[in-house]
Image (cartoon, rainbow, N blue to C red):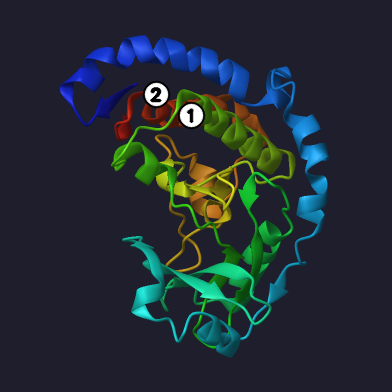
């Protein structure tokens, strides 16, 4: 198992950095496994009121989302991605002035409206200040859209790989690592242990500069309602069939998830895009 980095120096340093990552993982990953994140629950309790202030998950009409995004205007596009299940993310504003991110799936991605609604509702039950929380969805006709909190200060990828004035400070890098570990721990505690495509583009910053994990990675991307998209180096066979991991495979899945988290830590440490390979 190894990694391919975007330059030769990164490759030469990978072994040394991996040692650092192993220590960071011990501190940041899965306090549910070893209780090593001593401040996670205190931080959540301190800021719990902010989470409580969020509206409950709801279904939006397509007209509401069209109005919020100015008719899905090109100038409101935040990102476009997904080869197997193409989707576009728009910035929008509701009538109550709340800023939102609207993820619009390709029309063929979710043919079963009920399946899409159930999946979205499950993710929409999560409420945590380490996440960009899912506020609602829309599944009118052929439309399949997700509505989440909007984060105005770009992605971790931009701050790491495309900085123009100064690199990200180390204190912030460690803060990002801790906050994302807490986000993953929270999701796991709520039965959403599998996060799709964990990378620097899935981590965004709010208006106060706090790092958050995008809730969009908790939703499966599906073309036919049965296939699942993930960048895991090893995907358990039952996950390909049903979208869930059996408990008996936890001893297999956990090291893989930790390896992917180490990948993300490598990016934080080295300012390079890292590709996970086996």
Left or right: 202 in relation to 277: right
- What is the C-alpha distance between the residues marked 1 and 2? 8 Å
- Picture quadrant where residue 34 is located: top right
Residue 152 lies, in percent from the top left, at 50, 58
Observer able to see residue 231: no
Residue at the (41%, 47%) spot, across then down: 201
Q: Is residue 224 above or below residue 25?
A: below
Q: Earlier in the sequence, mark 1 or mark 2?
A: 1
Left or right: 118 in relation to 264: right
Residue 100 lies, in percent from the top left, at 57, 68
Residue at the (43%, 48%) spot, across then down: 155
Name the mark on residue 269: 2
Residue at the (81%, 38%) spot, across then down: 46
Residue under pointer 1: 173
Residue at the (46%, 42%) spot, across then down: 198
Observer able to see residue 217: yes
Pointer 1: residues within 10 angstroms few (<14), some, or many (20+)?
A: some
Name the mark on residue 148: none
The answer to whether marks 1 and 2 mark residues whose Cβ atoms lie closer than 8 Å is yes
Q: Is residue 268 above or below residue 222?
A: above
Q: Give the position of the C terminus as an image quadrant.
A: top left
Q: Give the position of the N terminus as an image quadrant.
A: top left
Q: Nearer the viewer, residue 242 or 45?
A: 45
């Amino acid at each position: 198992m190894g990694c391919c980095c975007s330059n030769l120096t990164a490759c030469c340093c990978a072994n040394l950095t991996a040692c650092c990552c192993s220590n960071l993982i011990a501190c940041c990953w899965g306090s549910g496994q070893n209780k090593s994140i001593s401040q996670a629950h205190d931080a959540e309790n301190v800021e719990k009121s902010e989470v409580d202030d969020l509206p409950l998950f709801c279904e939006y009409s397509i007209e509401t989302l069209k109005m919020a995004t100015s008719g899905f205007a090109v100038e409101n596009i935040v990102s476009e991605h997904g080869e197997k299940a193409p989707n576009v993310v728009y910035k929008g504003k509701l009538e109550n002035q709340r800023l939102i991110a609207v993820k619009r799936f390709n029309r063929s991605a979710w043919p079963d409206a009920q399946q899409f609604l159930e999946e979205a509702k499950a993710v929409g039950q999560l409420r945590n200040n380490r996440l960009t929380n899912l506020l609602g969805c829309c599944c009118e006709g052929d439309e399949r859209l997700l509505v989440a909190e909007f984060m105005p200060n770009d992605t971790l990828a931009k701050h790491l790989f495309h900085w123009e004035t100064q690199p990200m400070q180390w204190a912030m890098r460690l803060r990002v690592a801790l906050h994302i570990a807490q986000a993953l721990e929270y999701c796991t505690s709520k039965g959403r242990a599998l996060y799709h495509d964990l990378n620097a583009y899935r981590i965004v910053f709010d208006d106060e500069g706090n790092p958050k994990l995008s809730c969009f990675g908790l939703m499966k991307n599906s073309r036919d309602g049965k296939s699942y998209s993930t960048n895991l180096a090893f995907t358990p066979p039952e996950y390909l069939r049903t979208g869930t991991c059996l408990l008996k495979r936890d001893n297999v899945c956990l090291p893989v998830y930790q390896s992917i988290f180490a990948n993300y830590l490598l990016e934080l440490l080295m300012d390079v895009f890292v590709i996970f390979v086996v």
